[in-house]
Amino acid sequence: MNNFLNSRMMFALAAIACGAVLAFAFYLQYMQEMEPCPLCWFQRLAVLGLAITFTMGAFAGAESKTAKRVAIAATLIAIAGAGVAARHIWIQNLPADQVPACGQGISYMLENMPFLDVFAKAIKGSGECAKRDTWIGLTLPTWTIILFFCLTAWAWIAARRAPRSKYFS
């Protein structure tokens, strides 16, 4: 069992988990008609970034140095994603009279504004970000923060399982 669950396999499983989370997000959007707000889209981008990072880790060498780089990259992406999710939770918990007004949709903003302006506007929040959709008793951004924490821990466990290089470099 120890040989099966090596660092490369752990990174592959994490990439599959990220794909499953994204598939679930699109299921909620298209089948359950839960329209994502701009902050949701940026959380999805962070999950996609993790999926790409973990996929690269699964295909890269299995050495300790490579696995640690993957874990560092995953940690940085997860911190950014958790920051967006935390901001989302904060907006969801604002009193009704303090919720920002609804803004343009993410598609409109991406077509008409530079990306950094879209990000800045999204982080400020809008009325649609205050909607509290739940799944198994927790809001979706709360689940996202839990996901980011778990994937970061998984990445570091995978990095520790990677074999050390035969050569000191």
Image (cartoon, rainbow, N blue to C red):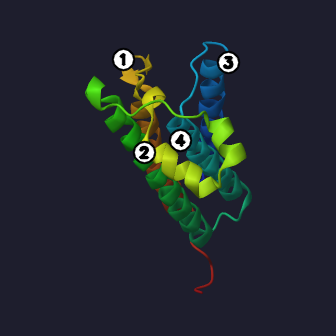
Secondary element type, mark 3 = helix
Instruction: Give the numbered dot on residue 93.
Output: none
What residue does disc 2 label? 124
**Dots 2 and 1: beta carbons under 8 Å?**
no
Q: CA distance from mark 2 to mark 1?
A: 26 Å
57 w.r.t. 165: above or below:
above
Classify residue 1 by image quadrant: top right
The location of residue 99, given as percent across then percent down, is: 34, 31
The reply to whether dot 3 and dot 2 touch (C-beta < 8 Å) is no
Q: Indicate which disc residue 43 carries.
A: 4
Find out whether the residues at labels 4 and 3 contact each other: C-beta distance under 8 Å.
no
Among the 4 quarters of the image, the one containing residue 132: top left
Viewer-closest of 139 and 60: 139
Q: Which type of secondary structure does the marked residue at label 2 adopt?
A: helix
- Marks 4/1: CA–CA distance: 19 Å
Dot 2 and dot 4 residues touching (CB under 8 Å) = no
Q: Please tell me whether mark 3 or mark 1 is closer to you in this view.
A: 3
Q: Is residue 25 above or below residue 2?
A: above
Whether residue 33 appears in this view of the structure is yes
Which SS class for mark 4?
helix
Q: N-terminal of the two: label 3 or label 2?
A: 3
Q: How many marks?
A: 4
Of callouts 4 and 3, the N-terminal one: 3
Give the residue drawn at x 49%, y 60%.
76
Viewer-proximal residue among 10 and 38: 38
Can you give x and y, in whole percent of width and height, for residue 163 in the image?
58, 66
- What residue is pinned by disc 1? 137
- What residue would you read off at disc 3? 30
Q: Indicate the position of residue 116 as horizontal and vertical percent values.
A: 58, 57
